[in-house]
Amino acid sequence: MCRSSVIAIITLSVVMVTSIGLNVLVSRLARKFYVELSGSRIDPLGLKSYPRATGPLPSPSLLFYGDSRAKEWPSPDGLKNTLFINRGIGNQTTAQALGRFQAHVSSLKPDVIVVQAGVNDLKAIPLFSSRKKELIDDCKANISRIVNDSVECGARVVVTTIFPLGKVPVERWPVWSGDVAAAIGEVNAHIKTLAGEKVTVFDTAQILTNEQGIVFPKYSRDLLHLTPEGYAALNRELVKILVP
């Protein structure tokens, strides 16, 4: 067999293997998004994800609230005898988090609420570019209302800036743009204006990112989520905030 035929066969094999791999990846992603879409239609606010809040928690208590980034946030060490409760739900927008606040949080009356939400609103911007301003404005307003509702139920609030992004993977390229990072920056600037007597703003980028504004590889599990090391770094700072 001549050299050119061997090269052609190898090239064809590589193309076929790559094509099969991409098809498997696309199929898995399509199934994942279909499951998430179907779940949001069955239970739009995620009310069945947790039991309805029925009474005050014992003190001291700390509650993590928001999307998957809040859901994955582990209890910090260094807060003695503190009860930790998590009410995060993966893939939720700020509108969904706001809509279920009364059912999942209000009557629990936790001493501290840590809020992390917003990226699921803003990651939709490349798909709905004509609605970019609306998505950003709604995200700001919803986070403000979640913070306000948290204060009204008697909690001290630690509202985090929206976590910065990791490296954008190839499969996200068709549905991604630099507008997402810019929108995160704009909403985070708004979040910083919410600081007050009972509200502390926790700027996560100062801990998680390198000089290029990208999450350090050791802290980045994927584009949107953190590794245990990332959360450990955040928790070290969170304890300092809560125990000056």
Image (spheres, grey):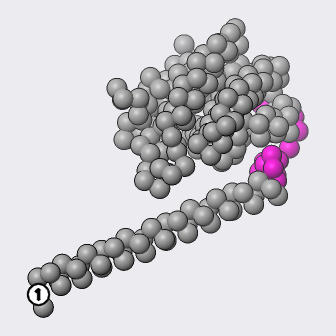
| Residue 2 at x, y percent in the picture | 11, 87
The residue that appears at 81% across and 50% down in the rendered structure is 44
Compared to residue 13, the image places residue 76 above or below, namely: above
Residue at 82% x, 58% y: name it: 42
Residue 44 or residue 230, whichever sits in front = 44
**Magenta stretch: includes residue 57:** yes
Magenta span: 43-59
**Nearest the camera: 171 or 32?**
171
Q: Is residue 90 visible?
A: yes
Under mark 1, the amino acid is: Cys
Image coords of residue 131 (percent x, y): 69, 36
Q: Residue at x 67, y 29 (%)?
A: 133
Q: Is residue 50 magenta?
A: yes
The residue at 69%/21% (across/down) is 157
Residue 43, placed above or below residue 101:
below
Quadrant the N terminus occupies: bottom left
Q: Name the spot of residue 208 as percent of width and height, x first.
A: 43, 31
Q: Could you tell me residue 74's position as x and y percent?
A: 57, 40
Q: Which residue is mark 1?
A: 2
Residue 19 quadrant: bottom left
Image quarter hosting the C terminus:
top right
